[in-house]
Image (spheres, rainbow, N blue to C red):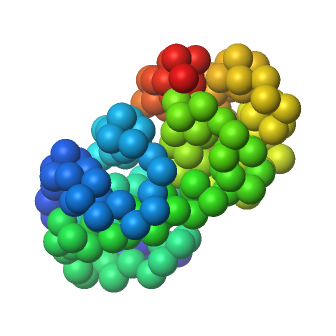
Amino acid sequence: MKKPTLLLTTACSVLAIIGIVLNNPDGIRTSQQGLALIGDAEGCRRDPYYCPANVLTVGIGSSAINSKIDIKKKLTDEEIAERWKADLKIAEQCVNKYANGEKLPQGAFESAVSITFNVGCGKMRYSTLFKYARQGNIKAMCNQFTRWIYIGNKPSNGLKQRREKERQLCLHS
């Protein structure tokens, strides 16, 4: 199937979106540090695009998996922030439910939210990383991040960098 033609790329400011989210967090536990890790890794675009895993995406890593994307619409900062908060809530709920997130130290929690935001709850809920989190073995949990560097069967330099940042945040909880 041929992909639809998408609009020209229009970047937005991750920092501006973080400011909007922090001004009205709506129950988001992830701090500015965690938001910056996720936002910097994902980048911010007002127009829809296909990510390296070939998933239709908009804003800060918001995919059509969680909510519909109009491929002809450029989003405002407020729309991007609302989509991001909704997606973050899904990732946080997954970490709380399957990785004992409410008992994790803040850095470990935020790292788990970041990887869950990136790969999805379905892949993380049965992972060894979440198993160690449930057991309270934070060091072993943190050392699992660097295993999650593949897109398809190929290692990704971007994911290597992101996973190392997640690992470091996790270890320094």
Asked if residue 74 is positioned above or below residue 10 in the image, the reply reads below
Place residue 49 in its image quadrant: bottom left
Asked if residue 116 is positioned above or below residue 23 in the image, the reply reads above
Horizontally, residue 104 falls left or right of residue 125, namely left
Horizontally, residue 113 falls left or right of residue 94, namely left
Task: Give the percent coordinates (x, y) of residue 118.
Answer: 53, 48
Task: Give the percent coordinates (x, y) of residue 36.
Answer: 32, 39
Please state the total of marks drawn on the protein image: 0
Q: Give the position of the C terminus as an image quadrant.
A: top right
Q: Is residue 48 visible?
A: no
Residue nearer the viewer, 129 or 12: 129
The residue shown at (20%, 52%) is 19
Residue nearer the viewer, 77 or 171: 171
The residue shown at (31%, 78%) is 71
Task: Give the percent coordinates (x, y) of residue 155.
Answer: 58, 28
Horizontally, residue 15 falls left or right of residue 28, namely left
Asked if residue 19 is positioned above or below residue 77 in the image, the reply reads above
The residue shown at (70%, 17%) is 139
Task: Give the percent coordinates (x, y) of residue 102.
Answer: 66, 46
Residue nearer the viewer, 7 or 110: 110
Place residue 69 in its image quadrant: bottom left
The residue shown at (78%, 23%) is 137
